[in-house]
Image (cartoon, grey):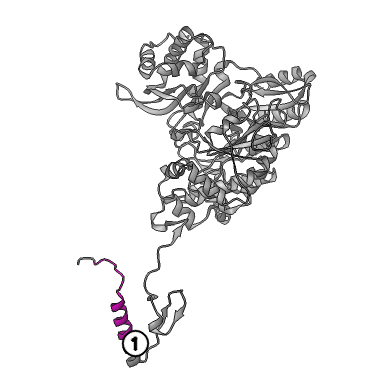
Amino acid sequence: MQHMPDLPFSEEQKQYLQGFMAGVLQRGGLSFVGQTADGRLTHEPEQAVRDLATPAPAETLYGTPIDRLCKQERIKLELHPLDMWDRVLENAAAGRFPEGDDVFRYKALGLFYVAPAQNAFMLRCRIAGGFLSSRQAHGLAELAERYGAGYLDLTTRANIQIREIGARDAADVLMALADLGLTSRGAGADNIRNITATPTTGFDLQELYDVRPLVRSLYYYILNSRDLYNLPRKFNVAFDSGGVITAAADTNDLGFVAVRVDEGHDVPPGVYFRIELGGVTGHGAFAQDTGYMVPPEACIATAAAIIRVYLENGDRTNRKKARLKYLLERWGVERFMEAVQERLAFSLIRFPREACTPRPPLRPGAHIGIHPQRPEGHYYVGVDVPVGRLQAAQLHGLADLAERYGAGELRLTVFQNLLIPGVAEADLEPLCAALRELGLSHESTPLRQGLVACTGNAGCPYARTNTKAHALALARYLEEAGISVDRPLNIHLTGCPHSCAQHYCGDIGLLGVKVKTDSGETVEGYDIVLGGGLEAAQGLAREVARGIPFEAVPPLLAHLLRTYLQQRQGDESFAAFTRRLDATTLETILAESKPDATP
């Protein structure tokens, strides 16, 4: 039967039907119930404009019809992840891992069931700003020993993950984390992830503003705002104090970057925070300056408005287009900021970035080694943590050293390492000796200072390669091959397109892939991108090679680095060198590579 379109009745038809129904009711003595134009019920047919049996308009979620929502949105709508504590307790008591849709919901609590890589949970904490007290560090080490496999991973969001947690321990580990004054709520799924910050804030010699109170305020605002636990996708926030070590604010959905405005402008002189939006390097974008800034005291309200405009308008039908970047592309920055302004009782300040006082340069490599800090006579010590992996005993030892020689705290960085601040000059030597006893060091080669690797397929179901093992093997090969660079070189290995290790930001970025060899065997390999950078050296790396088996990657990169050292102009950086050459030239250099003899 041909389907007839749903067309509204004409006035003549309405009058006929009302008269007809009135006659029917009079003859049959039936009661009538209808609905008026303003939604009230009536027994008078002439007042009724809609039959109550007519289906109501489809329900919507922030304007998106329910039947158009993607799978993850429907999962959250059916049962909000924050409402499943009873289910967590039930599963833990039964020794059962989550199944089906609950695997996704558990992520919002910070528990990731990572099968088949490991038949276990990974717990992702929230270490706001990367600020960790010695007491909390001891506590996390104990959690890794009691519930995990005795090790912890430092992440590129200045965070900590504990792995190989059993099904029965899910509830206990969450409660034990809360006992430390920490949480994992919102550490995964469609939430605001760990807030990052300049790791030296509060004692940095050149910073413009101590951002610790801002990080703390936003952290607690998020934790206590239930609506912020249902974003279209994840959302990253960073605070950059203007210090010596980058917070990588330009890779975040929202970055607040401290700037100074001197006398002679239309705004009062002082420190403000530029608003940057839309960074997601795995999708090919750095955050862009919006043209607006706010005073420090307005940052949290502004962040709340920005996040809610995204929450209500982001795409909930297509996960691949749900990040803030895509809303900005659809609307444009100006329309987005107008929507933000409508939510604020104060005015955002439009001010050109070039009119701000130029920022002192960052110090590459300042996250490793001994560096002066405030107050005078004190130092922070950057500890090299190879690919971010710490044994629990090492974290216990670091917490002890921070208490004995430092300020009783550790600072995590986006480079998968940590700092011990507040060390008096007289204590530097015994501290460094104690680090060596822990199997750690404040010293590192330029090849290792910027070595970053995601979890890899040893612990992540999405990863295609064993990134951490490959990163260490690559660094060892290059050093034994005699490759010696005179400045830090960022080499980032990520196991899948999620790009947790931000491979597009590295001087050299490696994206894990499966490669089929000439013999038909499938092996682990990498696509290679070159020339990425952050902040003043900002740039997305360009792809120059695809599907290279890992065994061929070290000799290939050794040849590339030798070519760089031979052909660079003056003290030209590796990123500048690769950007100066066109893609064809870079591909030719790589093609010239011959497998070196094993050193």
Q: Which residue is mark 1?
A: 22
Q: Position of residue 222 (x, y in %)?
A: 61, 48
Q: Is residue 511 above or below residue 37?
A: above
Answer yes or no: is residue 95 visible.
no
Residue sitting farthest toward the top: 566
Q: Nearer the viewer, residue 318 or 114?
A: 318
Answer yes or no: is residue 376 visible.
yes
Q: Is residue 476 above or below residue 315?
A: above
**Predominant secondary structure in magenta?**
helix
Q: In the displayed structure, does residue 464 sit left or right of residue 16?
A: right
Q: Residue 534: say if magenta.
A: no
Region rendered in magenta: 4-24
Q: Nearer the viewer, residue 10 or 499?
A: 10
Q: Residue 14: say if magenta.
A: yes
Q: Quadrant of residue 269?
A: top right
Q: What residue is shown at x 69% (from left), y 23% (from top)? A: 381
Q: In the displayed structure, does residue 165 sit left or right of residue 176?
A: left
Q: Is residue 236 above or below residue 430?
A: below
Q: Nearer the viewer, residue 98 or 326?
A: 326
Q: Quadrant of residue 295?
A: top right
Q: What residue is shown at x 47% (from left), y 58% (from top)? A: 78
